[in-house]
Image (cartoon, grey):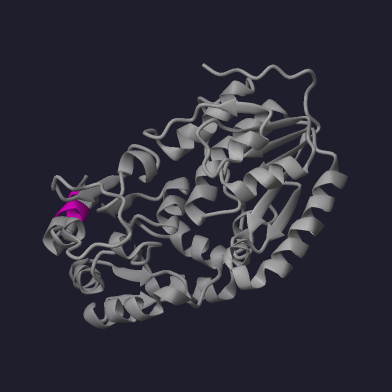
Amino acid sequence: MDKINLKKSPKKILIVKPSSLGDIVHSLPFLQALKDGFHDAEIHWIVAKGLEGLLENHPMVKKLLVIEKDRWKDLKKIKDTASELAGISKELKRESYDMAIDLQGLLRSGLLAYATHAPVRIGFREAREGSAVFYTHKITGGRDIHAVDRYLKIASALGCETADAGFPMPLIKESDKVKRLKENAGDYAVIVPGARWETKKWSPEKFGRLASMLDIKTMIIGSKSDMEISKRIEAASKGKALSTAGYTDIKELISIIRGARYVVTNDSGPMHIAAALGIPVIAIFGPTNPERTGPYGKKHIIISSDIPCAPCYKKKCKTMRCMEDISVEQVYKEICGYCSS
């Protein structure tokens, strides 16, 4: 087991974990373990623009540093990226961090950790894009374990207690818009039809037919990019589903999930929010491995097709058999089994 011997207890710590939504949720038990282990330390976090709502006003995070991560990939904006990187590098150095922890494990996150000039810079030994060269201490995380447990390996190496680490979600004041939605819906389930890969998406028509069969109403959540498929679900639900996709921010999305009886979802960021909030999840998996990225905890239901090519981790597929073979009746049966237990 890896172990990091510190010369002194850190007073200021930076966590580098810009994205994605699900990955940030997976990092919350690490945040709790770190704060419990170094309760006097001030913790800062680098997060991607658009995801800061998940960590704003979090009692364990003293300061958020928001970066335009997506712009960094655009070669046409290389001058703006260089300017932003130079500016944030100066700010990071000025903060005088005692420790920087890179949970992302990519070139840009390694560079950000290095820019702090912190005497202790920690990351994973198997980090990608050569980022491990920027660390003073390397931890073996492993590939075939859940992301939550992988991140906790760093906390354990620092001597932090990890056995009881939970998901410290920030308290969020419910907006009037969400209050009205909940009042009108009554008892409801949540459907999450979006995902970062097309191959991880179950058919919107199947989601819609499922919604029409349930004994409670459903609310469909997602970003603006999910609006079209959410409308298709709404149309196929026979009046049983309401689409909120594109009309809520992250905080409102969390509030909607918090009030759900259960969540039916693809492998997605909101799936992990639901699991973190303790809401039962019925998760539909195809090209990805639920042992690595599934909803964390034991009370959730995983539905997948038993075909030899899955999980393949492909973002493109001509047949998408792993998702197409999962029937509405199969998912409905699992939900009925959960509701009757």
The image quadrant of residue 316 is bottom left
Q: Magenta stretch?
A: 333-337
The image quadrant of residue 336 is bottom left
Q: Toward the viewer: 85 or 203?
A: 85
**Is 62 left, or right, of 70 in this rendering?**
right
Residue 284, how many percent across, how many down? 26, 55
Q: Toward the viewer: 263 or 152?
A: 152
Quarter the C terminus occupies: top left
Q: Is residue 44 above or below residue 187?
A: above
Residue 335, how many percent across, how many down? 21, 54
Q: Main secondary structure of the magenta part?
A: helix
Point 62% across, 73% down: residue = 76
Q: How many marks?
A: 0
* Residue 161 visible from this viewpoint: no
Residue farthest to the right, as pictured = 94
Residue 176, magenta (yes or no) = no
* Residue 52 visible from this viewpoint: yes
**Is 234 left, or right, of 221 in this rendering?**
left
Residue 132, how many percent across, how many down? 60, 35
Q: Is residue 160 above or below residue 273?
A: above
Q: Toward the viewer: 151 or 41?
A: 151
Point 50% across, 65% down: residue = 253
Residue 291, how many percent across, how many down? 33, 38
Q: Is residue 226 above or below residue 284?
A: below
The image quadrant of residue 120 is top right
Q: Toward the viewer: 228 or 241?
A: 228
Point 60% across, 17% down: residue = 3
